[in-house]
Every structure is written in structure tokens, then in C-alpha cells.
Image: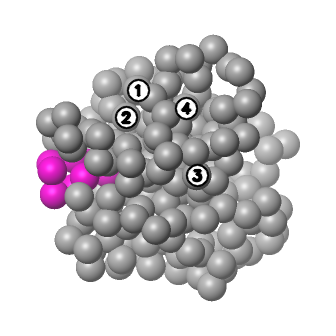
Amino acid sequence: MALIILDRDGVINKDSDKYIKSLDEWIPIPGSIEAIARLYKAGHLIAVATNQSGLGRGYFERVDLEAMHHELNHLVHQAGGKIACIVYCPHAPDDKCGCRKPAPGLITEIEQQLSISAKGAYIVGDSLRDLQAGHGKGAIPVLVRTGKGERTLTKGDPLLDHSEVYDSLEAFTDKLLEKGGK
């Protein structure tokens, strides 16, 4: 199975500069749930790695985050797919942890939980830090224009020159499965 690591906010669900704090605010991007199911059905192992500093900042509680992830898993399951694991960093930026992207800690956690290397996996995100977290582990960077993706493209980082860019997770999925899916 080929591993695909997805960021959450801005890739799977709509993002907000005010944070996604509740299940009511967690709104899937059209086509994203179906894209995850299609990737799974094509034989991919799907993992989600997400920074959730709203926890560390006190904007919401762990139970709120668990409700969002339960709904994500439920919707993907209803569409015929499965997410192998969801890992998150609960820390605020000033906490200096090793798991907050762009640090590779979440990717390492996925590797350990799933007993698979991220080398050669796709890492799909809407920000430079998503791509950096996977790139350091040998993952292939994919930027989507949803969420903060358009803003990220204006940064001119050299990593972006070596990244695949798609309009959405759905567009990435279409292209990947069109060219054989692996």
C-alpha cells in the first residue's frame, strides 16, 4: 500500500483564520471526502497529520477535536473509504515541541503507528509547513490551492518549485488515479 499523508484544515475541510473550534464549524471541502474514499479504494493507506494549536491556546477542548475527527471518519466510511490514522499536534507555536509542523514529529508518529516509511509517500497540504514536515522524511510534496494554498504559492520558497500543485484534494486524486494511482 502506498501512503498518502493529508493535512486537515484547508485540504479536507474549510479553514478559518479564527480556527475550526467545533463540529458545527467543521465543513468538508466539496469532493474531499469522496477523494479520500477513492484513494483508499485504489489501495492507498491514508493518514492525516494536523496542527491543532487551538487546543494549546484554549480555543476548544479535546472533546471538540475528537467530535470533528469522529465525523471525518464517519463520512469517509460512508463513502466507502477508511483513514488509517489521524495524528495532531495540540501545542501552541511558542511551546517549541517536536510535533508541530514543519517539525517532522507527526510524520514520525504516522510511520510508527502504521509501521511504514513516509519516504516516497505523498504529503498533501495547503501550507509550506505541511510540505516541509513531509519533505524532511522523503515524502513527495503536493500543494493544494484550497485553504491557504493560494497564499502559500506567493511565498516563493524553493520547495514549492519541486512540489506538485493542484486546485484541490479532489483534483490531486483525479490526476493520481488517472496515471495509475501509485
Q: CA distance from mark 2 to mark 3?
A: 17 Å
Task: Return the x and y of residue 115 as percentages of the image width and height.
Answer: 26, 39
Residue drawn at 29 percent across, 48 percent down: 174
Comparing marks 2 and 3, which lies closer to the viewer?
3
- Which residue is denoted by mark 1 in the rendering? 140
| Amino acid type at image mark 1 | Ile
- Residue 146 is tagged as 3
Residue at figure coordinates x 44%, y 77% from the top left:
70
Marks 2/1: CA distance? 5 Å
The residue at the point 63 percent across, 43 percent down is 149
**C-alpha gap between disc 4 and disc 3:** 14 Å
Position of the C terminus by quadrant: top left
Kindly indicate the quadrant of the structure image that contains residue 13: bottom right
CB-based contact (under 8 Å), mark 4 and mark 1: no
Q: Earlier in the sequence, mark 2 or mark 4?
A: 2
* Distance CA(mark 2)–CA(mark 4): 9 Å
Q: Nearer the viewer, mark 4 or mark 3?
A: 3
Q: Left or right: 82 with respect to 60? A: left
Amino acid under disc 3:
Thr
Q: Is residue 39 left or right of residue 162?
A: left
Instruction: Tell me which amino acid carries mark 4.
Output: Leu
Circle 4: element type: helix
Circle 1 packing at 10 Å, graded few (<14), some (14-19), many (20+), is many
Q: The residue tagged with tag 2: helix, strand or loop?
A: strand
Residue 160: x and y in percent read 58, 23
Residue 174 visible to the viewer: yes
- Please give the residue where the numbered disc 4 appears in the rendered image: 131
Q: Earlier in the sequence, mark 2 or mark 3?
A: 2
Counting residues from the start of the chain, the first of labels 1 and 3 encountered is 1
In the image, which residues are magenta? 39-46
User: Which of the marked residues, 4 or 3, is nearer the chain's N terminus?
Assistant: 4
- Categorize mark 4 by other alpha carbons within 10 Å: few (<14), some (14-19), many (20+): many
